[in-house]
Amino acid sequence: MGMDLSYLEALMGGGSQGPEGGSGGVWVVSPEGALDDGILRLVGKARVLADSLGGYVYLLLAAGAGQDAGQTAIRAGADRVVLADGVPALADLVDFFSARAPQAVLLPYTYLGRSLGPGLGQRLGGGVVGCAADLALDPSTQRVIAHVPVMDNAARQNVIILEQPAVVVVDTLALPAAFSEPWRSGEVEESGLTWGAAPAYLAADLPAFPARIATAPLVVAAGRALKDAGFEVARRLAARLGGALAGDVSALDAGWIDEEQLVDITGQSIAPKLFLALGISGETTHFMAIQGAGTIVAVQADPTAPIAQVADWNIFADPAQFAQALLDKLGA
Amino acid sequence: MRIVVCVKQVYDPATVRISRSREEFDLRGATRITNPADRYALEAGLRLRDGDALGGEVIAVTVGDAQADDTAHEAIAMGADHAMLVSGRELAAASGRTVTRALAAAVERLAPVDLVLTGYIGAVNGTGGLAGRLAAALGWPVVLDALQLAPAADGLEALVSYAGEGRLVSLSGPAVVSVRPGPERPRYAHAARIANAWQPGLVETCSPADLGLEGDLLIGDTEAGGLVLGAERTRGQVIGGGVEDAAGAVLEVLRSQRLI
């Protein structure tokens, strides 16, 4: 007496097709052919999504990656690894996926991934998210939900992807660590596809330009308590951290900064990821201008100063000495 | 050279709050500005035009509601020759696909266009996908993260920030280029230009239907939901010890949170 397994098969793999059929499923694309930690994390995330969707995980590994890489990816959660030569252009990926009707295509947040992903989704008529820090599945609708970093990563917004395929460029640094499960089995397929060479761009020096406080993700702000010598250390610290140098009204009065660097409601309101306040007591007008900051680290000597009530991290010490110690530890 | 610059009106990130209780953006008191990254794209376009011996024009295109009119006029005040505003109720909170379609239709209407510039990301909740999508919709190549653009023998040369390193990319035909803030700061609009920017006829306003966007073509590909918030900020934590220890502890915290 034979059992009808069609329902189970549909649940497991979208019909009687195995992973070799290559239809549906969650695809991870490594356009550079790299199988680094980021791609393995992405394969792990695809595994979680595919298990909820009842589908397979595929990895498209370009640039002539070998069989060994394929086995590593299988241990990280892939059911089938498709190897190709060369680096795909957008048209190559569109052709590749048009024949395969994927449920989701995930690309890493690299230059190539960012260049190809949004265009691929547009051409396939799918739903596109250009940068996600994590992915989830709506349990009732089976739609992919991307967690998009917003407000300089102060929060994440759920973005529901309404169309299939869901094409998402994922910041793999934010994903959970990759897993490696030796019992997993899968197949490595040489697709025979040969794409073009990677674009050869000439190297060039990036122009040096000062970070601006309105757009800089990291701001070092100076206040009166630093004194002249301490301000010089703060300036070097800002340069070493690649951040912008700012100050409060007292720093403006001392002639250390100009008006464009003033953080105050009479100057600029800013929302950097990190605001490092050195020797700033935190008048109300100053605090109101930094409320949007992601993390505030305040270094000054007075535990009763207003900024101590609002900073995420307080160090009650001489700000100039602290800045010097931090600079020394950074190796500058 | 005819350059189209995509400019978008966004909420000023410094005025947007996050409501923890409702898990959404609190936009009360939020003001709207031209997306800061788009101002850099406009500056890059203006510099190309100004340096072009054969002359050329810069056209700012914006998609949004009626208020986005301000952004179109601001672009003209900065130096754009004229502007196009694609505006309609259907476009309020439009998804990336709808905005892409509207911009692609606008570029086709403005043909022949040699170059399309965009900012590298939208403030508040942008993901930086526009340039790639728009290029795919137009069938043009895309170049991301250009810091500087300069004319070259047979087209343009873009200095690109490629994984933190500089690369020179040559462009010989129409392309979509996203611009990152670089050494060239967006210019201020001086008073006379601001006054002139409001002269009639400089901003062409059209509806999605004027561009052939109706019905299914306006259905979005994504829908924004609520916010996922981390643990509430614990204020006033003190790092003690001497200066040396405190510096080490701060460095550890900042590195573990990937702030530096």
Image: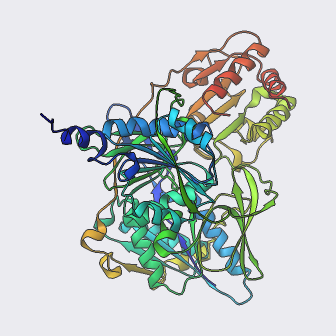
Q: Residue shown at 39%/79% (left/top)? A: B205
In the displayed structure, B144 sits above or below B50; it is above
Name the image quarter holding residue B118. bottom right
Image quadrant holding the C terminus of chain A, namely top right
Left or right of A130 on screen, residue B81: right
Q: Position of residue A77 (x, y in %)?
A: 47, 35
Count of numbered marks = 0
Closer to the camera in the image, B6 or A313: B6
Q: Position of residue B209 (x, y in %)?
A: 30, 78
Image quadrant holding the N terminus of chain A, namely top left
Q: Residue shown at 47%/26% (left/top)? A: A183
In the displayed structure, B58 sits above or below A223; it is below
The reply to whether residue A193 is in sight is yes
Closer to the camera in the image, A274 or A36: A36
Closer to the camera in the image, A85 or A171: A85
Q: Residue shown at 49%/69% (left/top)? A: B136
Name the image quarter holding residue B159. bottom right
The residue positioned farthest toward the left in the image shown: A1
In the displayed structure, A151 sits above or below A178; it is below
Closer to the camera in the image, A286 or A115: A115
The residue positioned farthest toward the front in the image shown: A1
In the displayed structure, A64 sits above or below A227; it is below
Left or right of B84 on screen, residue A282: right
Q: Position of residue A276 (x, y in %)?
A: 67, 31
How is the structure coloured here? Answer: rainbow
Q: Residue shown at 60%/69% (left/top)? A: B42
The reply to whether residue B194 is in sight is no
The residue positioned farthest toward the top in the image shown: B241
Q: Position of residue B169 (x, y in %)?
A: 72, 67
